[in-house]
Amino acid sequence: MRYKMEILFPPDSELEVRQRIMQLLCLIAGFFILAVFIPANLLQHLPWLLSAGLFLFGLIFLGMLLLARWRDIYLYKSLSLLLLVSLNFSWFFNGGSQGPTSLIFFSAAILFTVIFQGALRWSLLAVLVSNVLALYYAELIFPGHIAPYATPTVRLQDLTVSVPCSILICVLMMMTVLGAYDAAHLRLAQANAQLEATMAEMRVLEGMLPICAACKKIRTQDGQWTMLEVYIEQHSHASFTHGLCPKCLPLYMGDHI
């Protein structure tokens, strides 16, 4: 099965995996922040600073999407920094460890793993883990800095919205990676098939060919006798054009030369 994001990425798109992931994340983050999270927070009467901050982050995410789509500018490091800042902001204004922010850190881990390589990837993952641990210890030491939920019902409502969105982000990123893998696997299979066909054509003219000593016809595998040039044309890319050599020309043309 091939996983393709047909709306965001056309079938003939040649974007790299990390470019697709960045566009996908910016689109989802911007859309859900502005169309889902902020309205839900307002209905739950969460701190207004949370909605104001999320609104700013949502606009920045969409701005990065526009830069990537129409200017081909991919700010990978800026995206990573923005994601960490937004998660830290959400942690303090959205219930801390009791809220959904800790789940979204898993999405950030997948993002860093996909779009970065080598030492930078491991450095960012180390920063991410250290950041999460620091938030837990900060909440333990300074619990008053965390904006709590008004009631358990408000917390349940927030998790009901945020958890499916976090899962969706992870699933879509993995679908993008799997889609790129399937596309590469298909291209490799097609290349192998073409190579095998070419090698098969080359192998046909190898070995011993039964040929008539008189008329020079070739005996095929099914026992039929065919003209030499016809056989070669059928089993290779060669073609023939006929003429007469100087030795045979007098025999066939006679006095007409």
Image: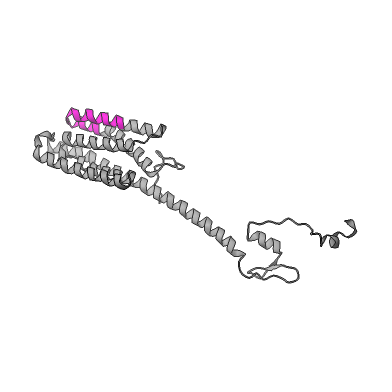
Q: Which residue is more in the foreground, 182 or 117?
A: 117
Q: Residue at x 25, y 45 (%)?
A: 125
Q: Quadrant of residue 112?
A: top left
Give x and y (percent) for residue 177.
36, 47
| Magenta extent | 37-60
Query: In the picture provided, is 141 more to the left or to the right than 87?
Result: left
Our reading of the magenta stretch's main secondary structure is helix
Observer-nearest of 52 and 72: 72
Q: Position of residue 5 (x, y in %)?
A: 39, 42
Q: Is 41 part of what is drawn in magenta? A: yes
Report the residue at 58% width, 64% height from top.
Answer: 203
Residue 201, relative to residue 145: is it above or below?
Answer: below
Q: Going by the image, does 186 lie left or right of 91?
A: right
Residue 213 percent coordinates (x, y): 73, 72
Q: Position of residue 211 (x, y in %)?
A: 69, 70
Spot the residue most to the right. Answer: 255
